């Protein structure tokens, strides 16, 4: 089914040095931008992560230090990528848990002003797991009746994700709506405030801590009562996005 788009949508996939959002880096980004009129453009970029690519990561995606030694750093291309993403909805496979937090972290390191949390994010894996419980290759076989060639190649995975979402709309017409707002909400897996889930929304919509000694307590109340906790988190080994969100809540309290 052709996607019913009000905004352009970007399907994207990352290959990285590992799975630690705060420490690992992107080595390849691929995205397909689909316009409301159906026109598509695709981009694949190798990135020099500025660090050694661990052998176990290279074994998965096939990208080695030698392959990226002459490639740009993320900060060198971050503004161009951000310009492509602005004004778009975004989609991926396991993107809400990994690719989106990783990309947000890289933008913050590059000091590029783009707030991915404000974009409608559709996670095709979440839709799939809610309805079928499989992997990307199995999802491609199930929905598209084809074998996924070159799995863990960013372009192959990104193209497969795009095709799977279209097939999911055909397969579940009574469950899924061809509407990006609906799909974004349906594929939301968490009630996270920050991408890492250190803070979450409670049933009343308040931000509360999701870890540590203040778990379950409102963030704004803790920051007012224990000013040292803010400094501890800002100096700690937390994701940049977590620190950004925490600062935003703290500044909101000053304005009140």
Image (cartoon, rainbow, N blue to C red):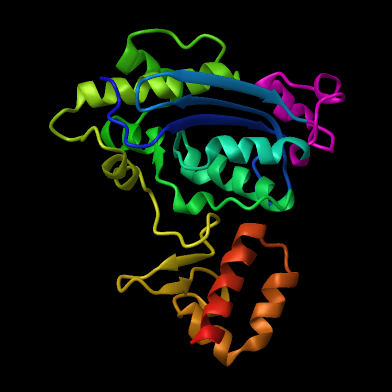
Would you say residue 254 is visible in this rendering?
A: yes
Q: Is residue 148 magenta?
A: no
The residue nearer to you, when weighing 106 against 226, is 106
Please say whether residue 59 is one of the residues in the magenta stretch. Answer: yes
Location of residue 129 in the rendering, given as x and y in whole percent from the top left corner:
34, 35
- Choose top left, top right, bottom left or bottom right for residue 184: top left
Q: Residue at x 45, y 80 (%)?
A: 218
Residue farthest front in this picture: 37
| Up/down of 177 relative to 211, above or below | above
Q: Residue at x 75, y 30 (%)?
A: 47
Residue depicted at 56% across the width and 34% down the height = 84
Which residue extends farthest bottom? Answer: 225
Res 63 → quadrant: top right
Q: Position of residue 18 (x, y in %)?
A: 69, 38
Q: Quadrant of the N terminus?
A: top left
Residue 179 figure quarter: top left
Closer to the camera in the image, 186 or 179: 179
In the displayed structure, does residue 226 sit left or right of residue 142?
right
Please give the range of residues in magenta.
48-75
Query: Where is 136 relative to 219, above or below?
Result: above
Residue 88 lies left or right of residue 19; in this view the side is left
Asked whether residue 239 appears in the rendered view, the answer is: no
């Amino acid at each position: 089914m052709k996607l019913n788009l009000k905004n352009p949508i970007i399907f994207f996939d990352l290959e990285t040095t590992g799975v630690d959002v705060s420490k690992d880096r992107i080595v390849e980004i691929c995205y397909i931008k689909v316009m409301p009129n159906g026109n598509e453009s695709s981009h694949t970029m190798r990135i020099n992560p500025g660090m050694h690519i661990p052998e176990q990561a290279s074994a998965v995606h096939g990208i080695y230090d030698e392959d990226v030694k002459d490639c740009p750093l993320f900060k060198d291309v971050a503004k161009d990528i951000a310009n492509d993403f602005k004004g778009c909805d975004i989609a991926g496979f396991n993107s809400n848990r990994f690719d989106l937090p990783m990309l947000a972290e890289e933008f913050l390191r590059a000091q590029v002003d783009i707030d991915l949390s404000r974009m409608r994010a559709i996670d095709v894996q979440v839709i799939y797991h809610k309805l079928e419980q499989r992997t990307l290759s199995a999802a491609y076989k199930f929905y598209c009746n084809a074998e996924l060639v070159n799995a863990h190649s960013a372009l192959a995975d990104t193209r497969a994700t795009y095709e799977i979402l279209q097939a999911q709309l055909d397969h579940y017409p009574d469950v899924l709506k061809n509407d990006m707002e609906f799909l974004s909400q349906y594929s939301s897996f968490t009630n996270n405030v920050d991408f890492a889930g250190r803070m979450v929304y409670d049933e009343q919509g308040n931000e509360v801590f999701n870890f540590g000694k203040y778990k379950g307590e409102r963030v704004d109340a803790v920051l007012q009562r224990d000013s040292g906790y803010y400094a501890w988190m800002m100096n700690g080994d937390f994701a940049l996005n977590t620190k950004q969100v925490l600062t935003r809540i703290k500044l909101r309290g000053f304005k009140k």
